[in-house]
Image: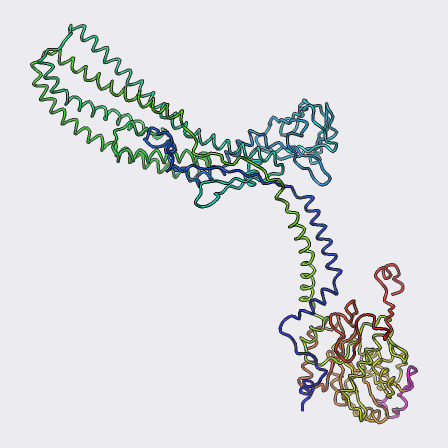
Amino acid sequence: MSDKKNQATDPLDPVSAQDSIDLKIYIDKIIANWYLFLLSVVLCSFLAVVYLKLSPISYKVNGKILVLDEKGNNGPKGLLGGDLSSLLGTSNSAENEIEILTSRPLMKSVVSKLDLNISVGANGAFRSLEIPERIIPFTAAIVHKTDTIVPRAYKILDVTETDFTLVNPADDFKVKAKFGQVVKLPQYDLVLNRKKGYIILPDGYTLLIESVDGKTDALLGQLSVGLSSKQSTVINLSLNYPVPSTGEVILQTFMDFYLKANLNDKNKIADSTLKFIDSQLKLVTSDLFDIEKQIEQYKKENQLADITEQSRVLIGTASDYFKKLDELEMQLTVIEDVARYIRSPANKRIIPSNLTIQDPVFSAAIGAYNTMLIERDRQSLTYTADNPIVKNFDEQLDNVRIGLLKSFDEYKRNLVISKNELVKRNSTLTSELKQVPKKERQFLDYSRQQSVRQQLYIFLLEKKEETAISKTSTFSTSQIIDPAKSAASPFAPKRNLIYLVGIAMGLFLPVVYLSIKEMLNVRVVTKLDLTNATNLAVVGEINHNEDEKSLVIDNKSRSIISEQFRSLRTNLQYLSNSDRSNVIMVTSSMSGEGKSFISVNLGLVLAAGGKKVVFIELDLRKPKLSLNMGMSNESGFTNYVISDKVSIESILKPLYVNDGTFLISSGPIPPNPAELLLNEKLGILINELKKKFDYVIIDSAPVGLVSDALLIEQYVDVTLYIVRQNYTYKSQLGIVNELAQTKKLKKTYIVVNDIQSNAMGYGYGYGYGYGYGYGYGSYGGYLDTKSNKKGFFSKLFNRQDK
């Protein structure tokens, strides 16, 4: 049966490498690094407290506005025959109103009205907190010197009833001034006026002055506007502000300004209509006055008092035709006036469509033009004239204006045709009236002209009265249903959430640190690192040597590390043949992993059990075994191989630590170590030693660096491969795997050295389940747990003891 199969069935073999992360290993790591979590939680909690101290407090101020549904509005009728909101030209939808509420002009008017670009705060230990106006003992006013203002914060200190000190560290500015005195500053002149009866805060105040535009942008950033639901026309307004009373004033003023602006839009439309009617009344009145003067003069000159019965009958017949002709002429007059009004692109006022003949198609075209014109005026409140949106409306208005002019021409053409028909009929009547005296016919012409002007005059007076009544009854299409009201407690910062986040971060950061450390770690640290890298059995685990002595085994030793070597001795009984002498080779990946230390103490613990042990120092390149035992290295294996005169007995040195232990040193360092190990005298030496000793322990060179150990392997019964915690690279375990798989090393087992002890026993999971039951608690008095390990402060203040 192969060695690999023997290892697979060996009861000492570890569990196969896991595909998933062993949760217990992580729990052990967390417990082992409890101080990191404690320190991180304390630090993050402290940072959370500092953040809460430095973060600005913010209250949420809420209000609601109801936008009335235009379709259901039964308000007063305007000139267009619909409700007054139709004069705006756009639907009073909630979405459009939201755009108006979030426009800069509206908020800018609030900032200018309340002087919000000047704020006063109370000085505190960490920062300045804005305070409400009712407790500020002074008022501040500025006179601008420049168009743009760079924000500046001034400290107002040493405030008394009559004077104060103004300080600005950024500009290295400090001046003592009296209340009411003008303080000359680079950007503006500042005047503070004392308010009597107000308490003065001892720590002083902070005066923040910024531009109106800057404050407007800041408030818009803290304002949220949205619909309460998709089916509702109720708009929810929310403003975040550090002072609840000031926030209520700002939001309430904002809503009032919005309603006022909404009502002003409607009044502008009515004013435009009244202005147009007044201009037309002046023209009609002047024409009517001229005709009446002509009639009066005509009667005086021709001495007309009554019309004959025959003329009356004839006139009665022609009167109907004249009336129709008068109506057509009146329509032509109105059409020409409106066409002349709209033909000028400079006119941006509403066309009163109810002044025209009530033709449905024609009225609809004028209504569409008015709708687009009002929408353009509304957008111009938010955007400049060069904005693509406003330009787009101007282009659409020009197109609609051209269409209207074409409609006017077509409508006028139809009226002219009708008029020509009536003129032909009137010509017939005129020929019949030739019998009537010429004076009477001229009088009828004057009367007809007077009648047309009278009808137009009365029509304009009626519309003027209707518009005036409509204006007085105009109301806003929106109303405040919930005035501005601040919440009782601040919504930011969220103290409980920040504390929770601080604690969570305090727990999370060490986990991240340990995870990153684990990912970046290239050395063997945990048992999982070892089991994931190799399937070779671990037969021994040796703790860190706190005493820093090479020899830790004697007959009276009861330390943890001595018990671990005894456990290793027990495990070797299962791996070696007790009926004959056994050759054990100790090797590793590289120098410094503790081969010599393991070799010495393993031999001593075997000797303590009554076995005869001999050490052979075959690390010919960098020998340390003799040094660790305090023995001379002047003669040894090298001398034996190169000289036939040197016998085995001459290089075999007894050790003082135990009567049953001997040492063969390496001797002088040769220039060709590998060639010496190939010498047949090595085999002769080992065979002779096997006859005299129970165990032959060979301290060889690292197999990961040189091939010396592979040359010795043919004489070896068991190979112990030393892995040092926090020292051996994980990648180096591939060396022993490859050597074991290719059978270049037979019966190879791993010994873990220099395991760091901690509160959990053997660091990170080592030290349980391999031949002994120690490792937790106070060991019940079985072991000597005293340690010479120095604490942190001892190392810090007593470095000479290291």
Q: Is residue 178 above or below residue 228?
A: above
**Left or right relative to 791: residue 743:** left
Q: Is residue 510 above or below residue 70?
A: below
Q: Is residue 33 above or below residue 303?
A: below
User: Residue 267 lies in what quarter of the image?
Assistant: top left
Q: Please name the residue shown 73% across and 78% down the image.
A: 704
Quarter that holds the C terminus: bottom right
Q: Is residue 702 above or below residue 513?
A: below
Whether residue 162 appears in magenta in the rendering, the answer is no
**Left or right relative to 471: residue 303:** left
Q: Position of residue 370 (x, y in %)?
A: 35, 33
Q: Position of residue 510 (x, y in %)?
A: 70, 60
User: Residue 95 lies in what quarter of the image?
Assistant: top left
Return the residue nearer the eye: 141 or 735: 141
Q: How is the image coloured?
A: rainbow
User: Residue 539 lies in what quarter of the image?
Assistant: bottom right
Total count of labels = 0
Return the residue nearer the eye: 406 or 6: 6
Return the residue nearer the eye: 13 or 664: 13
Q: Which residues are magenta?
A: 640-659
Q: Position of residue 408 (x, y in %)?
A: 25, 31
Quarter that holds the N terminus: bottom right
Whether residue 658 appears in magenta in the rendering, the answer is yes
Q: Please name the residue shown 60% across and 27% down the image.
A: 145
